[in-house]
Image: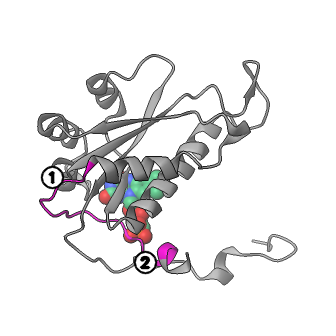
Amino acid sequence: MDELFKKRRSVRRFQDRPVADEVLADLFETARYSPSWGNLQCWELVVVKDGEDKRKLAGMLSPKNPAGKCTESAPVLLAVCGSPQKSGYYKGVQVTRYQHWFLYDLGIISQTLCLKAWELGLGSVIIGSFDHKAAEELLGVPEGVELVALIALGYPDQDPPAPKRREVSEFVHFGRFPAR
Ligand SMILES: Cc1cc2nc3c(=O)[nH]c(=O)nc-3n(C[C@H](O)[C@H](O)[C@H](O)COP(=O)(O)O)c2cc1C
């Protein structure tokens, strides 16, 4: 587990090798055990393999997004979608300070997907910066569901080093939050 957590990297260059349906099935079977608010499992995943659709989605990233090229070249894109008015709501009423717990749930399933992908020999990168509205229209995301992130998946063609991390002492506080 420790190695998986530390060695998983965002991969932005993939081999020209398809991902078998059985491998995807294995990935999704694990992902469905992700925790979620009230176990509501508000997530929906759209699996995009069509070359033209991937090209269109790649065009929805800003030209500066480092995941631009791999959005088109990845054998599989997952569109991670969810219903905003489930997590954090009870009988339609918001019950906590935060109304966006669905983002939390989608973050957790995204992490499960990326870690399991790594175990299966696949690289992945989460993509959060793109024209969400245009992507929703292309993929037919219905009213009441939002497309939050894309995950590009494929066999890695690079082994990037880990970007710098904050030291534990910078973000772990014992007893009290330190005065600022
Ligand atoms: C919510 C979220 C959104 C992200 N969006 C993008 C993105 O739009 N483009 C990109 O190239 N990487 C994106 N990333 C990947 C991060 O840049 C990457 O996780 C971070 O630099 C740490 O590198 P590592 O994943 O290799 O540990 C995103 C990651 C997260 C968690």
Residue at mark 1: 73
Q: Is residue 104 above or below residue 100?
A: below
Please provide percent x and percent y for residue 6: 48, 78
Q: Is residue 139 above or below residue 117?
A: above
Q: Is residue 29 above or below residue 88?
A: below
Q: Which quarter of the picture shows residue 40?
A: top right
The structure residue drawn at horizontal position 59% and vertical position 49%, both measured from the top left corner, is 33
- Taking the magenta stretch, the answer to whether it contains residue 119 is no
Q: Horizontally, is 128 left or right of 17 in the view?
A: right
Q: Magenta part of the protein: which range?
A: 4-20
Q: Quadrant of the N terminus?
A: bottom right
- The colour scheme used to paint the residues is one colour
Q: Are marks 2 and 1 in contact (CB under 8 Å)?
A: no
Please provide percent x and percent y for residue 91: 76, 18
Q: Residues within 10 Å of mark 1 (few under 14, many from 20)?
A: many
- Taking the magenta stretch, the answer to whether it contains residue 15 is yes
| N-terminal label among 2 and 1 | 2
